[in-house]
Amino acid sequence: MGEKRSAEIKRKTNEVDITGNLDIDGTGSTAIRTGFEPLNHLLTLFSFHGLFDLELNAKGDLAHHIIEDLGIAMGKAFKQALADKAGINRYGCFTVAMDKVAVEVVVDISGRPSLHGETFGNNTKYMAETFDDTNFTFKHAEEFLESFLQHSGISLVYIVKSGEGDLHHILEALFKAMGRALDQATQIDPRRSGVPSTKGIID
């Protein structure tokens, strides 16, 4: 493998101050302080299972601003760390089971960002739940994902495959599966010398 693929995480506005570092070729080491324990936990799971090293410090005014801007800052860093994306697998897919929950995540590092989710069966009650005894909701998680995907240029589809399970387990499974899928997608295929697109470029 060549140079390590890493980038500084930095975003400062009138509303937030975010700093940190991201290493794609890491070991899953984390030091994450976002001000939101559920998000700290989810990003730790994402990084640990994706084998990304992630340092993150964030402070700001409103929850919405911090969560959205964390996604922006991390997405930009992820895209920067991948540079021209030469040699990567580009695609990844992984399913994680958590107790009675199974969530599948499929990713494409395409330069065409999008987020799409599906739920099999009647399990939509988690969308109205909160993460344990906190104010963190599924909408907060989606706000982070939307920002992260838009600024990293990644397309992600998730499927909640179980008809049971609470918000905690669904989000844990989602972020673990995202980490594993992106680990697959960012791995270098030694057989490929260039960008994995017939266009010859991934924006």
Image: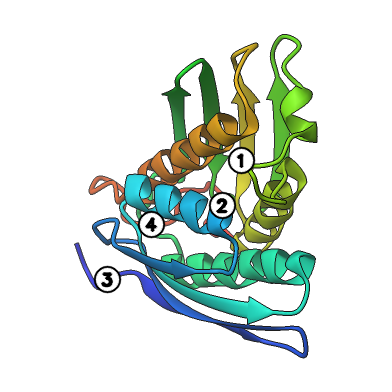
Which quadrant of the rendered structure holds the N terminus? bottom left
Judging by the rendered image, the residue that carries numbered circle 2 is 38
Judge whether 108 appears above or below 43 on screen: above
Q: Give the mark nearest the N terminus, 2 or 1.
A: 2
Judging by the rendered image, the residue that carries numbered circle 4 is 194
**Which marked residue is nearer to the observer: mark 3 or mark 1?**
1
Q: Residue 18: image x %, image y %? A: 58, 81
**Is mark 2 in CB contact (under 8 Å) with mark 1?**
yes
- Measure the C-alpha gap from mark 3 to mark 4: 17 Å
* Label 1 Cα neighbours within 10 Å, binned few <14 / some 14-19 / many ≥20: few
Amino acid type indicated by mark 3: Lys
Q: Residue 180: image x %, image y %? A: 39, 40
Judge whether 188 appears above or below 138 on screen: below
Name the secondary structure under disc 4: loop
Q: Is residue 131 visible?
A: yes
- Measure the C-alpha gap from mark 2 to mark 1: 9 Å
**Is mark 3 in CB contact (under 8 Å) with mark 1?**
no
Amino acid type indicated by mark 1: Asp
Q: Give the mark nearest the N terminus, 3 or 1.
A: 3
**Which marked residue is nearer to the observer: mark 2 or mark 4?**
2
